[in-house]
Image (spheres, rainbow, N blue to C red):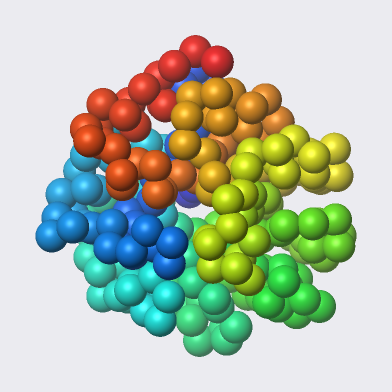
Amino acid sequence: MKMVDSIIKTKNNNKNPIIAEIKVHSPKYGNMINKRDELDILKIYENAGACGISYITDKEHFNGDFEIYKKICENTNLPVLRKDFITTKDELEKTASVGGGAVLIIARLLKENTAEFVDYALDLGLDTLVEVHNEEEINIAKETNSTMIGVNNRDITKLELDDGTVSLTEKLAPLIPKNMIFISESGIGTINDLRLALKYADGALIGTSFMKAPNIEQFVKEFVETKL
């Protein structure tokens, strides 16, 4: 199933569309996997009702591994978003070749090439999440055919070391094009954060707070099922 379709289906079922991230490492919090198996966390997210999965394949800052991404794709029917600092079309082909469901396209990185990368990814059958952090980047995203747009509440150039808040989603929401599925990314740690995010956005991408939760399944299920 496409990520966009999964989000819409979840909304139609009166659940909160949550893209749950299997996060191995955080530049701020360090090791987040803590000897757990990524596929075990995948099953927990599935059981909790997540509408999609996210995994960061960047090795340098997030200790990601493309082979793990491939395994995740092979072991779930949920759409799997690949997050990375993608700057070559080869990486888009690589994502599609292992059954990836969606790919992160960072407007700040690709600038005027964003639209071209989006079209290439769409032609490969991938959904695209164009990530923005300010008005200038939203204007770049508007010129694309992307299926999704995501406001990263944290500043990607600070590698998550800043304490981004959902207030950025609220601030930028009026500028978001209505023809794209709108995702609020990062900085969502409580039900109140989720309530504010989904007041404006169609779905939320959450990783750190899930990985830190004492009982992940119970915590994620609460985010999915709480009436906001």
Tag count: 0
Which residue is located at x 53 percent, y 61 percent?
A: 160
Res. 96 image quadrant? bottom left
Percent position of residue 98, x then y: 33, 71
Q: Nearer the viewer, residue 45 or 134?
A: 134
Tell whether 181 sits left or right of 23: right
**Location of the C terminus (image quadrant):** top right
Res. 159 image quadrant? bottom right
Residue ranking furthest to the top = 227
Q: Is residue 137 above or below residue 202?
A: below
Percent position of residue 37, x then y: 15, 57
Percent position of residue 161, x then y: 53, 62
Tell whether 48 sits left or right of 198: left
Q: Is residue 32 above or below residue 60?
A: above
Can residue 157 be seen by looking at this rendering? yes
Res. 112 image quadrant? bottom right
Percent position of residue 123, x then y: 59, 69
Q: Nearer the viewer, residue 71 or 166?
A: 166
Which residue is located at x 40 percent, y 49 percent?
A: 208
Which residue is located at x 37 percent, y 79 percent?
A: 59
Which residue is located at x 39 percent, y 62 percent?
A: 26
Can residue 147 be seen by looking at this rendering? no
